[in-house]
Amino acid sequence: MEGTGNQNQNSQDCFKVIPKEELKIFLERLNKEYKLILPTHKNKDKSKEKTKNNELIFDYVDVLNEEYEFPEYQNIRIAPKKFLFPQSEVLFSYEIEGNNIKIAEKGAEINNQIIFGIRNCDARSFKILDTFFSSGKYSDPYYFNKRNHTLLIGIACNEPMTTCFCTSVNGGPYSVEGFDAVLYELPEKYLFQIISPNGEKFKPYVESYSNASLEDLKLKDQNASHAREQIRVSLNLDNIEMELEGLYNHEIWQKIARTCLKCGACSYICPTCHCFDVQEKIEKTDIVGKSIGKRVRIWDTCQIPLFTLEASGHNPRAAGEKRTRQRIYHKFNYYLKNYDILGCVGCGRCIQVCPVNQDIRKTLVKVQEIAKNVQEGD
Amino acid sequence: MEQKEENKEIEKIGKMEEIQNSLKRIVKQILLEEEVEYVLGFEPGPLPLTAAPLFIESEDDIERLIWTDYCNLNLVKFLLEQPHTKKVGIILKNCEIHSLIVLINEKQIKREDVIIIGVPCDYGIIDLNKIKKIIGNSEIIKGSIEGTKIKILTHKEEQIINFDKILSDSCLFCKNKIPDEFDYQIEVSAKKQTPNSEELMKYQKIDEYQDVIEFEAKAAQERWNYFTSELEKCTLCMACRNACPLCYCKICFIDQNQPQWFDKNDDLSEKVLFHMTRALHLAGRCAGCDACSRACPEGVDIHLIYKKLRKSVRDRWNIEKVELGSKSVLGSYNNEDPQEFIMSEE
Amino acid sequence: MNSNNIKNQENMHNNIKNAEEQAVDIKDIGQASILEEEEINKIKKNNELSTLNEIEITNTSDESWEPKILAFLCNWCSYAGADLAGVSRIQYPPNVRIVRVPCSGRINPLFILKSLQVGWDGVLVSGCHPGDCHYISGNYYARRKFSIIEDLLEFMGIEKGRVNFSWVSAAEGVAFAKIIKKVTEQVKKLGPNRLFTQMKSGGD
């Protein structure tokens, strides 16, 4: 399934060889036309004290003017979701003076940008976000303003993490779904492949590079199967929608929820969680009755009780188990029902981040076991 | 010298197992003899060096029970969240017992409803956030504890880190490792309790609040910069608040919307405001279990704030820790309380 | 000299007016501090304070900077002290805005921190002298709370003098004026409060 079995797609001239030492030059050339979002070390330009932390994050890097070396990593801890759907985003600002109301929309000017070096799970998460933000009658302009100007160049995963389970949710370390172009890492070099029609824009940038040799392709395929083997957890989620269907009132949710802290760590780190709240922020109110403010969209999470609290005081999801259930149902049932895709990309971030060490894979296994028992019981 | 060191390390490994076995014995006894709904303990987590809370309801669950240096949560939290009809057993370390005492004093839990199984600590609890800061971006594939060292395997290399670099801050300085209040206590032979690493001994010899004192000596701007740069990482996910057994308000001030104190955007000033206010709400109550620091998914390190408030309480009113039945620190007063900070008109 | 005096007197007059008009009762209902509807409307009508929140700051331009100080005064002593200062025509700087609270024990640390966050340059909290509390012991409890706040603020690196605590009785009009003068001078020296306002980005 991976990389599509099409003969044409796999022929040698689809793959261009970029030697590792030339990657910087390649990025510089991209940087002339696009803003680049790259994996980089945190706090690189702030006071020295802060550089103690050598964590990698995605951030804007001006390769032309800054020192930059492409780092080695398995995956970046914080997903690049925040560049298209930031934790807090001004929708518009306003000025009110008497009956005069001036509204200024933000975000008219957006530069073309590339998120470079993302893994397949994150690329697929954007597909899910695209689906959500374009669903219904209206598509979300704030998201798509940025999304339409964003290209994704991924790097296939050679070393998946122990928490990865992308192969269980229709992805894979070498899957190219969602990328505009992709790099395959080999010793000393990268193979560059264009994936989507949008990715054709990169053609002029790679034309000068030589085509891949058959050996390179063989090595790439070896890497692919090696990477696949690294992912040891494999779930069969083909029927998960139906399996969950009968368990809405099952006691399992109470059991899972009682060890959960009901914090929002998992949903804030999740590349596909997209719930938001809209807040009014009044900045200044003048003595003469002039006021300035803005409307801000912020991340929200179904894991906290406030999420569903109604003005009447009633809360349909006051109990923890309902909130725990919601997270699983939303990703593995409602998403399939509404959009016919899974709401999870298997990046495993929520497993890494959970303060009580809950494992979504274990939860799914448990759910399936119970579903099986329930069925057999019938 | 080498050999001696090694011998002690073997004892250490033996000790954790010893504790674990006697815990299993006691839990079994409690399940059989006393009418408990469940006993709260830990089971292995999905990742190396992690533990997850475990509700032991039947004898079958006892097998999963573990006791290690990385049982990082304060289980008292789970005691409060669950409605229970019968008695509940809980396995706790001394600092956590003190947080439970605060809850009992504040009439949130009845003493007679809990069976406390007290476990003495020897070194303390490992802070996974500290390990992550040391190993950087790589993932822990395997971790094992040998004496006062920890061996960590990432996909790149193997690293051996001494305990003084990775123990929770409160544990490094802690001098009250034997449970003060309990129904059952795990006995450990005395000779096995002394720390056997010089680096760790160093901390045991200095004042409990040495790090606070050192921090206080820094310039004000430096202190402010430290806290703000740490809090910049905060995402307001509320893991710290939710991991804290003493944060039990039905509606937290940050969630309040009549009036709404927080704009709820991820502006740094809001984060600072939240953490300062939370710290003030815990003044005189915080038992210093550091569960909040360890729960933080971003590794924000502001434990000094809480420690400073504990020091303040000690220095101002001479209260070292909250005893069972004592009045709350901020809910009581003395006519002669110091008031040097009150401004005079002169 | 003379014109200065007149100006001062004007200021003082304004100040008394301010104190009377701007005083905001926070209803002590043991839970949240909810401003009474009426009170809010009154404030809005007067356009003296901003909407929504009693401690929201009004716009200040930087050129002729004068510190803005928010004073939380207890109803029974310090507020009466301020009143006495007013009726006795005692001069003090007009930089202070007063929020009346039932007792210094009513002070929630969040009031103080929020004031700093929204940009007040200084905060003063004042109650009855120990032993004189209308509610017998409110200020004793408050004193413990205040000392913790004081310690925390200093520890975190917030300048000493931004947040001040004092005891002023109903008979101490002179003392009240002196305290206000002292606080104003102190805060003037510290300069505008940029602690939190600098970090306010409010989203990208």
Image: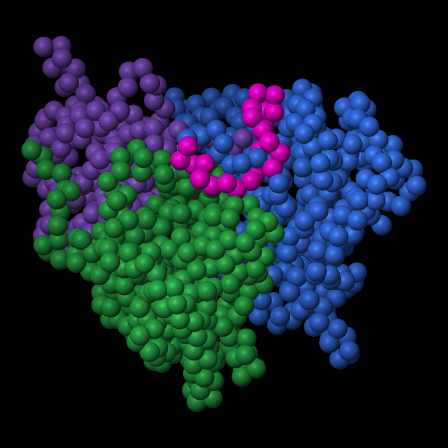
Which residue lies at the image location 49% right of the left edge and 70% below the top edge? Answer: B42
Instruction: Name the foreground residue: A263 vs B174.
Output: B174
Residue A61 lies in the magenta-colored region: yes
Q: Colour of chain A?
A: blue
Judged left or right of residue B309, residue C185 is left
Residue C167, relative to residue A65: is it above or below?
below
Chain identifier, colour purple? C
Residue A29, relative to residue B307: is it above or below?
above
Q: Give the colour scheme of this rendering.
A: by chain
Which quadrant is home to the C terminus of chain C? top right
Q: Position of residue A92 (x, y in %)?
A: 56, 28
Instruction: Name the foreground residue: C42 vs C195.
Output: C195
Furthest residue in direction bottom, as rendered: B33
Which quadrant is home to the N terminus of chain C? top left
Which residue lies at the image location 45% right of the left edge and 54% below the top edge? Answer: B161
Judged left or right of residue B183, residue C170 is left
Q: Position of residue B246 (x, y in %)?
A: 37, 60
Which residue lies at the image location 79% right of the left edge and 49% below the top edge? Answer: A222
Residue A273 lies in the magenta-colored region: no
Instruction: Name the foreground residue: C27 vs A362.
Output: A362
The quarter of the picture where residue B168 lies is bottom left
| Count of numbered badges drawn on the protein | 0
Q: Is residue B58 visible?
A: yes
Q: Position of residue B15 (x, y in %)?
A: 41, 74
Chain identifier, colour green? B
Q: Position of residue A255 (x, y in %)?
A: 57, 70
Which residue lies at the image location 40% right of the left edge and 62% below the top edge? Answer: B148
Task: Report the magenta residues as a range.
Answer: A48-71
The quarter of the picture where residue B86 lies is bottom left
Residue B261, relative to residue B13: is it above or below?
above
